[in-house]
Amino acid sequence: MRDRFAYGARVTTNEEAHRIAREKGVSGPLYLFVKYTAALIFRIVCGFTASGRENVPKKGPVVIVPNHKSFWDPFFVAIVLRRPVHFMGKAEHFDGPMAATFLRLGAFPVRRGESDADALATARAILARGDALALFPEGTRVRDEGLGTPKRGAARLAIEAGAPLVPATITGTEKRRWPLPRKVRIVFGTPVSVEGLEATPEGAAAAIGEAWPQVTEEYARWQNRAGVVAAGAAAIGLGAWFLKKRHGR
């Protein structure tokens, strides 16, 4: 695994990338420019909606736990919230000229497939300074139908920081209007308090066990609704065809 990332005109180590993420955070002007530009493009091309944004605290540490279907998921979480959001991104995304931009937009590298102490330390630093962190509990994109099994890491970080856990359900990003998704919908659920929980496997399991069902239920509800709409459209089309055939006799 490479451990050097391009930052501006020079190359920086994985260690320095994390130092930048911990000490500097997002670049306000760049973040706002990218956020509003992306929001405009996505609204025109994708037609997305968001609800439950009031469930995300306006200040103080918070851990947002969305499901993960697409590379585009972090963008939708970020553009619908007023406060900046930080994300872990796989280290390969930082191995190139876009590393500087990713870092200043709130992303930081994580080595997948191993316990990355640097990434965990950066996540703790972000929460310690009172910022928002979004982590995908499934660990990776779930390309199959349905959702994956959530891991406990995000909940444990939330307990350590005393940060509420906010579930978020994203639908539509798995569909494509090339190269962007279409008809995207994001719903932020009821925050889960971690007060009184210990940062143990049991405590983390209890927290994610309260948050994740909100995601699975909302996702299933929306998928079922989409199925009903499709079936209704098919029935209408079949009925129109039948009437046309009948009157054509």
Image (cartoon, rainbow, N blue to C red):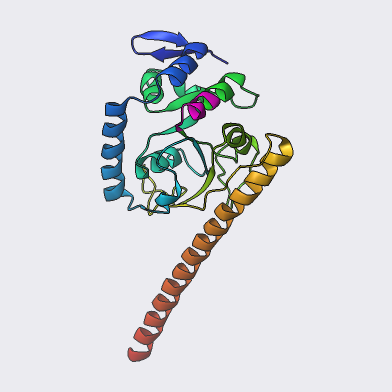
- Prevailing secondary structure class for the magenta stretch in the rendered image: helix
Residue at the image position 55 percent from the left and 26 percent from the top: 124
Can residue 95 be seen here? The reply is no
Horizontally, is 158 left or right of 239 in the view? right
Q: In the image, residue 181 lies at what x, y percent?
A: 39, 47
Q: In the image, residue 211 lies at what x, y percent?
A: 59, 49
Q: Which residues are magenta?
A: 124-131
Q: In the image, residue 87 lies at what x, y percent?
A: 47, 32
Residue at the image position 41 percent from the left and 82 percent from the top: 239
Assess whether residue 176 is covered by the magenta stretch: no
Q: In the image, residue 77 lies at what x, y percent?
A: 42, 42
Can residue 150 be seen here? The reply is yes
Residue at the image position 30 percent from the left and 39 percent from the top: 38
Horizontally, is 210 left or right of 20 in the view? right
Does 177 sit above or below residue 17?
below
Residue at the image position 57 percent from the left and 32 percent from the top: 161
Quadrant of the frame with the C terminus = bottom left
